[in-house]
Image (cartoon, grey):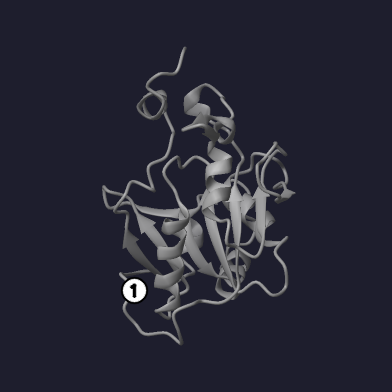
Amino acid sequence: MITGTPGTPGTGGTPGTWAAVVLAGGGGHRLGGVDKPALVVGGRTLLDTALAACSDSAQIVAVGPVRPTSTAVLWTQESPAGSGPLAALSAGIGRLSADVEVAVVLAADLPAVESGTVGRLLAALGSSRVDAVVLTDQQGRVQPLLGAYRLPALRHALNAVGDARDLPFGRLLDHLSIATIADNDGAADDIDTPQDLDQWTPDREE
């Protein structure tokens, strides 16, 4: 359930110990099967961009095929591999440490995401009583793979969904109270098509 922008006062300005779950499956079907997290934009891979945005986290779990990274991460994989982002999220949540209270969820195809984006999500979650805060892109679309989720509520929602394989990610949102914040700097822009890739890598050789 999406409730709008954060506004209900919570118990403080921080939501607690947080960790990151980075979804790095990298199917890239509309890009001809290219490994999206391994694409280099701005001198680093999209995966490393996502990891850098989470550099202040207590733990980072990456879900997908193991790849070289500039930051130490704990790798895991949904089963079967390629069974969708909701199954990947479930696998990642299962590897988080017991003291984690909030999970920041990021896709690994966001060339403009930064630590400031993550900070805004966490601050909004800490100042409200909702289960999650997610970004809306510049067209007003909800982007659940760019959000901060209270872990107990997220676990409950995943349990309510049941078998997550090949289910749309939106199925999870039916079991959560969600507030949104606007994307003011293009952090939600992803690379999904050859046109997106050309926009971010204008000097790329074919």
Q: Does residue 13 appear in the picture of this structure?
A: yes
Disc 1 is placed on an element classified as: loop
Reply above or below: 145 against 108.
below
Reply above or below: 82 against 61.
above
Q: Residue furthest bottom?
A: 11
Neighbourhood count class around disc 1 (C-alpha, 10 Å): few under 14, some 14–19, many 20 upward: many
Residue 76 as seen in the image, left or right of residue 204: right
Q: Position of residue 78 (x, y in %)?
A: 69, 47
Q: Residue furthest top?
A: 206
The residue at 67%/42% (across/down) is 64
Reply above or below: 206 against 132.
above
The residue at 58%/56% (across/down) is 55
Q: Residue furthest left?
A: 139
Q: Position of residue 197 (x, y in %)?
A: 42, 27
| Image quarter hosting the N terminus | bottom left
Q: Position of residue 40 (x, y in %)?
A: 53, 30
Q: Nearer the viewer, residue 28 or 73?
A: 73
Q: Amino acid at mark 1?
A: Pro
Q: Which residue is mark 1?
A: 6
Q: Nearer the viewer, residue 201 or 178?
A: 201
Q: Position of residue 68 (x, y in %)?
A: 70, 36
Q: Nearer the viewer, residue 69 or 6?
A: 69
Reply above or below: 10 against 91.
below
Q: Does residue 167 appear in the picture of this structure?
A: no
Residue 117 as seen in the image, left or right of residue 61: left
- The answer to which image quadrant residue 82 occupies is top right
Count how many numbered circles sit on residues in the image: 1
